[in-house]
Amino acid sequence: MSNFNKNYPKTKMIVPPSNTLIPERDADKLPVLDVRNLGIDFGGLKAVDNFTLTIGKTEIAGLIGPNGAGKTTVFNLLTNVYKPTRGAILLDGEPTAGKEPYEINKMGIARTFQNIRLFNEMTVIDNVKVGLGGSVKENLFDALFHTPRYRKNEKMLNEKAYELLGIFGMEDIAKLKAGNLPYGAQRRLEILRALATKPKILLLDEPAAGMNPSETAELMENIRRIRDTFNIAIMLIEHDMNLVMGICEGIAVLNFGQIIAKGTPDDIKNNETVIEAYLGRKENKKNA
């Protein structure tokens, strides 16, 4: 029988954070995400085990590890795409157990995917408006007969969508089909669509994939700008170590489904266990 969240009632609670780094500016605030001993089994395989991590209110955090380490599985657990076998997830102190993925999104977790999932036949702006859809209330009558309320809502959605497109300077391509965009632009659009849902924490799964160095540098600045503008936390999975080390305040390293190290970028760069996990062996020390 699953023991997921068995110790946590479905009410909001103030809890001490698990043992991890939190930026000083967030130290006096309830962590936006507090994950305790999270795990999932696929048959007899422990795909993720004893995953424990805390993310501060406005932290930019990284989750790294070799291919197959379980990083995307962790994102699927945090969003309840996969149902955890054990452990607890608290979002702003609220347990997420038993929620459907769309309910997790409403609670405040939004994500992008390793493989881009846009509505390719829809325009750029309509993709963003899909994310904004939960911010308006209208009924079938409004939609069928284009009532004043419908027109007012459409005007508001367009204004908000263009405001979001402005983050990446994409206003001029608002009417293009999403499927016709270059790969890097599709990545940026997916981030904006997730951001449109007004998350408390944004999960980015390999956001720099397919981007050239100049696009990656621009992405780094835009991630900071998103954090500062919307006052949210961001957690990213990424193989581009220049991006990770240049933007993340705290980093957790996953290997075979378990965290093997946590720390600042400098801590992680110099951690022998991390080096061994990536290289598959310990580096031979040179003779003095």
Image (cartoon, rainbow, N blue to C red):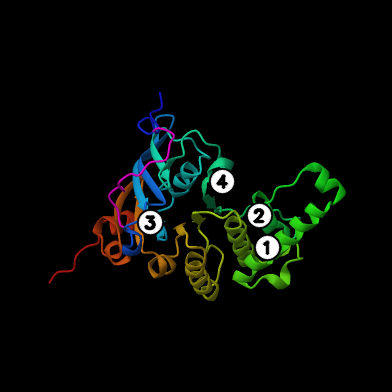
Spot occupied by residue 103 in the image (x, y as percentages of width and height): 56, 41
Which amino acid does the dot numbered 2 rest on? Leu
Residue receiving disc 1: 161
Asked if the residues shown at circle 1 and circle 2 are in contact, with their CB atoms under 8 angstroms apart, the answer is yes
Residue receiving disc 3: 56
Task: Report the front residue among 256 and 74.
Answer: 74
First in sequence: mark 3 vs mark 1: 3
First in sequence: mark 4 vs mark 3: 3
SS of the residue under disc 1? helix
**What's the residue at 66%, 67% (across, down)?**
182
CA gap between label 4 and label 2 equals 11 Å
Q: How many other residues sit within 10 Å of disc 1, few (<14), some (14-19) or many (≥20)?
A: many
Which amino acid does the dot numbered 1 rest on? Ala
SS of the residue under disc 2? helix
In the rendered image, which quarter is residue 127 located in? bottom right
Q: Which residues are magenta?
A: 9-21
Magenta residue check for 13 = yes
**What's the residue at 47%, 59% (across, down)?**
232
First in sequence: mark 3 vs mark 2: 3
